[in-house]
Image (tube, helix red, strand yellow):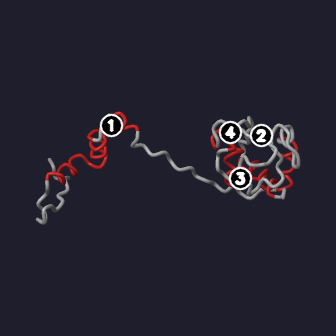
Amino acid sequence: MFHHLVRLPADGAAGRPSHCSWALSLLGYTGVCLMVAVLAGASPAFAQTTSAVPAARQWVTPPPGDVVRGQALYQAQCTACHNVDSNKIGPAHRGVMGRRVGSLPGYKYSDELAASRLRWTPQTLNVWLADPEDLVPGQRMGFQVDDLQQRADLIAFLATLR
């Protein structure tokens, strides 16, 4: 019945478990963490909610983009709110690649975007254009580009704006 239990050497006697080693093997890591949290004064509900670790974001480099198609897409989809050299509803885009997110002088960003501590790279722009709210919850841009190749083309164009 308990053939899966691990016997840890204790008190200098190899193969002779201490009471703690039996507890560890019976409870497992999660049970021990829960037990420690409860003994430390936390409720079991607190210990269970804090055990989940959020998944790390996967930064994906977009495929190579076409600058000419990107410029056409920019003209068709972005210029209602953005300009290359001046702020409109959205900030100017010249020099966007490599710039810290939310940092263009003279433009009033949302507090969330200004505090994001991100930098515009092909990877961050890819996530941003796919779903701005996913990258920075609370931002104000209400537009997204669903097509991966179109995002890549826009990013290739933005990279030329130095």
* Badge 1 or badge 4: first in the primary sequence: 1
Q: Is the residue marked by circle 2 packed among few (<14), some (14-19), or many (20+) residues within 10 Å?
A: some
- Identified by mark 4, the residue type is Asp
Q: Is the residue marked by circle 1 packed among few (<14), some (14-19), or many (20+) residues within 10 Å?
A: few
Q: Secondary structure at mark 4?
A: helix
- Identified by mark 1, the residue type is Ala
* Quadrant in which the C terminus appears: bottom right
Residue under the point 21% across and 51% down: 25
- Identified by mark 3, the residue type is Arg
Q: Which residue in the structure is indicated by mark 4?
A: 111
* Badge 2 or badge 1: first in the primary sequence: 1
Residue under the point 15% across and 61% down: 10
Q: Is the residue marked by circle 3 packed among few (<14), some (14-19), or many (20+) residues within 10 Å?
A: some
Q: Which residue in the structure is indicated by mark 2?
A: 108
Whether label 4 touches label 2, CB < 8 Å: no
* Badge 4 or badge 3: first in the primary sequence: 3
User: How many discs mark residues in the rendered view?
Assistant: 4
**Residue 93, image x and y in percent?**
82, 49
Q: Which residue in the structure is indicated by mark 1?
A: 42
Foreground mark, 3 or 2, reads 2
Whether label 2 touches label 1, CB < 8 Å: no
- Identified by mark 2, the residue type is Lys
Q: Is the residue marked by circle 4 packed among few (<14), some (14-19), or many (20+) residues within 10 Å?
A: few
**Residue 135, image x and y in percent?**
64, 44
Q: Going by the image, does 143 lie left or right of 26?
A: right
Q: CA distance from mark 3 to mark 1?
A: 40 Å
Q: Secondary structure at mark 2?
A: loop
Q: CA distance from mark 2 to mark 1?
A: 43 Å
Whether label 3 touches label 1, CB < 8 Å: no
